[in-house]
């Protein structure tokens, strides 16, 4: 029987293991943004930001300051002659639409010599640059599921009357938003800095030297470390990119951790569409009669199209688990003040011995198509830090104190029984079973479900290696880029026209598949936007 302690001893489950002098779990956007803002104020040499999206007008401390992210970075660069800021964001802002700045690279205003903004186009067709990572002076790092963009800021109370959760462009209330970041200090932050520098090199051909130690204590004041001198593993998903080997360490980490579970697997994730993970969970449930699996996920995805595509996979995932052990599986959604909470976190705790958090969804694309970064901590026995993190998360969802959650769980000897006792559906916060039949897929979106795998592929549609084998040197691929841009625009237009009924084609799924393929061509057609002054 595999044990949780053996997970990181297994090959392929991680890239590096380094020590975190200090580590703290930051739950929800308010905690993360405040910690990041405080750490940025102390930066002396380097800030590297990797993200799926980023907005120049983001407010990191909306309750106390109207300073935007762009203004903050300009101010910091002006105050510190040796500070360099580098931002790497996915290059698909226009197609992804709502909530994104159409031209984020122009939104920062006059760029400084030491502020560089790059839109990364090196991801293979169908893939996305999805990491959420910030590294400061190679000494402090933040990794998890939160982008520096619209709709991410919230507090654990998720109060609907909090005006600071307004969407930037439309002024409409956003749903409550829940996510998690891990802040780490020390050698593991330096390793994450190497990872970020590698991604920067692939996107720009620039080789970054380590920033070197400044000696400044970057740890934000007022935040207590949850753990000290703890080994932290770094796991990656990487498609095959020019100059970057493929890696599926996050998938291997999940499968190995599940295979060693004995008592409890606790998951928070935006998506549930990986058949291999569903089968691994079902297999372990059959093998371990005392094992419980608790999963917290959104009630619906973001928008009808995404819900239509991803619910097909979520239904299969949920059915696979419940067929193995219905009484020991709970797939739940979080409710707050009558609103559904958008659970955007990507984390898993196994037997309170192993904890992983990062950018990787439990979606096929996060296992092998997109670029992702997770970190993981494990111990040979149940660890009070990991247990404390899990109790804090559950306490938020249940509207209770962590101590009450811990005491009830200990009394009942079951996490599922504790959740069912403490979930008061008349209260402001509670957990409810996920009902995937509560929002049936409307026409004509039902046809798109037939091509759902195109939106959540297990592998890139066209790998960069194929382009190389066709004899196209990297510097001569502009034709591919421009054709891809045109294809993307045509795909968006056709899909919108079909959806709005402006055109009538024989088979809906054919046009949906064709449009999606054309839109994915955009990913192949873009090139990095590199903006800087020398």
Image (cartoon, helix red, strand yellow):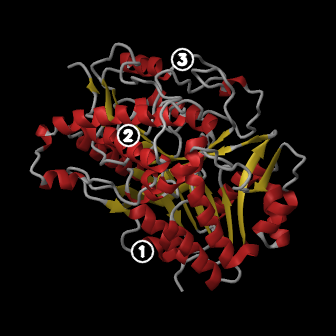
Between label 1 and label 2, give the one nearer the viewer.
2
Q: What label sits on residue 67 in the rendered view? A: 3
Q: Residues within 10 Å of mark 3 (few under 14, many from 20)?
A: some
Residue at 38% x, 45% y: name it.
514
Is 343 situated left or right of 20 in this image? right
Does the rendering let one see residue 89?
A: no
Residue at image coords 82%, 64%: 418
Question: Mark 1 to mark 2: distance in Å?
Answer: 41 Å
Please indicate, yes or no, whether residue 62 appears anywhere in the rendered image.
Answer: yes
| Location of mark 1 (residue) | 9
Using the image, determine if residue 266 lies above or below residue 528.
below
Q: Do the residues labelled 1 and 2 touch (CB within 8 Å)?
A: no
Q: In which quarter of the image is the C terminus?
A: top left
Q: Label 1 neighbourhood size at 10 Å, few (<14), some (14-19), many (20+)?
A: few
Numbered label attached to residue 519:
2
Q: Is mark 1 on a helix, strand or loop?
A: helix
Circle nearer the N terminus (3, 1): 1
Q: Residue at x 77, y 46 (%)?
A: 335
Q: Count of labels shown?
A: 3
Q: Is residue 348 left or right of residue 337?
A: left
User: Cα distance, mark 3 to mark 2?
Assistant: 35 Å
Q: Where is residue 308 in the image (x, y as percent from the top left)?
A: 58, 49
Above or below: residue 281 compared with residue 484: below
The percent position of residue 406, horizontal first and vertical second, equals: 78, 61
């Amino acid at each position: 029987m595999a044990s949780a302690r053996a997970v990181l001893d297994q090959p392929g489950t991680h890239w590096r293991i380094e020590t975190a002098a200090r580590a703290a779990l930051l739950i929800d956007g308010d905690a993360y943004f405040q910690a990041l803002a405080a750490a940025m104020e102390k930066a002396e040499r380097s800030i590297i930001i990797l993200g799926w999206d980023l907005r120049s007008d983001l407010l990191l401390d909306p309750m106390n300051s109207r300073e935007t992210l762009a203004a903050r970075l300009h101010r910091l660069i002006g105050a510190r002659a040796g500070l360099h800021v580098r931002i790497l964001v996915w290059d698909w802002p226009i197609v992804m639409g709502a909530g994104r700045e159409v031209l984020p690279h122009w939104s920062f205003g006059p760029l400084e010599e030491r502020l560089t903004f790059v839109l990364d186009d090196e991801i293979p067709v169908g893939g996305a640059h999805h990491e959420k990572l910030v590294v400061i002076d190679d000494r402090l790092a933040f990794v998890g599921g939160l982008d520096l963009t619209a709709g991410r800021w919230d507090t654990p109370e998720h109060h609907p009357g909090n005006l600071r959760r307004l969407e930037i462009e439309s002024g409409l209330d956003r749903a409550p938003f829940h996510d998690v970041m891990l802040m780490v200090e020390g050698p593991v932050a330096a390793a994450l800095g190497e990872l970020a520098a590698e991604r920067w090199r692939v996107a720009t051909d620039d080789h970054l030297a380590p920033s070197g130690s400044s000696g400044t204590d970057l740890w934000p004041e007022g935040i207590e470390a949850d753990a000290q001198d703890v080994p932290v593993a770094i796991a990656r998903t990487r498609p095959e990119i020019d100059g970057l080997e493929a890696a599926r360490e996050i998938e291997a980490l999940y499968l190995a951790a599940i295979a060693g579970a004995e008592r409890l697997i606790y998951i928070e994730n935006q998506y549930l569409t990986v058949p291999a993970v569903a089968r691994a969970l079902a297999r372990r449930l059959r093998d371990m009669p005392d094992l419980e699996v608790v999963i917290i996920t959104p009630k619906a995805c973001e928008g009808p199209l995404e819900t239509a595509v991803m619910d097909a996979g979520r239904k299969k995932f949920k059915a696979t688990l419940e067929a193995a052990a219905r009484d020991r599986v709970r797939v739940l959604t979080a409710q707050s003040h009558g609103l559904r909470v958008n659970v955007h976190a990507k984390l898993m705790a196994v037997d309170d011995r192993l904890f992983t958090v990062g950018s990787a969804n439990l979606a096929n694309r996060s296992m092998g198509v997109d670029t992702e970064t997770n970190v993981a901590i494990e111990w040979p026995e149940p660890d009070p830090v990991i247990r404390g993190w899990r109790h804090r998360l559950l306490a938020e969802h249940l509207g209770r104190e962590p101590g009450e959650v811990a005491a009830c769980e200990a009394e009942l000897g079951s996490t599922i029984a504790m959740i069912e006792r403490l979930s008061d559906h008349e209260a402001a916060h509670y957990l409810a079973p996920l009902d995937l039949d509560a929002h049936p897929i409307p026409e004509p979106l039902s046809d798109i479900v037939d091509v759902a795998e195109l939106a959540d592929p297990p592998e890139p549609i066209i790998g960069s290696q194929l382009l190389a084998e066709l004899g196209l040197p990297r510097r001569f691929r502009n034709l591919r880029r421009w054709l891809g841009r045109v294809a993307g625009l045509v795909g968006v237009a056709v899909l919108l026209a079909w959806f709005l009924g402006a055109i009538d084609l024989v088979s809906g799924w054919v046009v949906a598949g064709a449009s999606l393929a054309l839109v994915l061509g955009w990913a192949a057609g873009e090139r990095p936007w590199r903006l800087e002054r020398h």
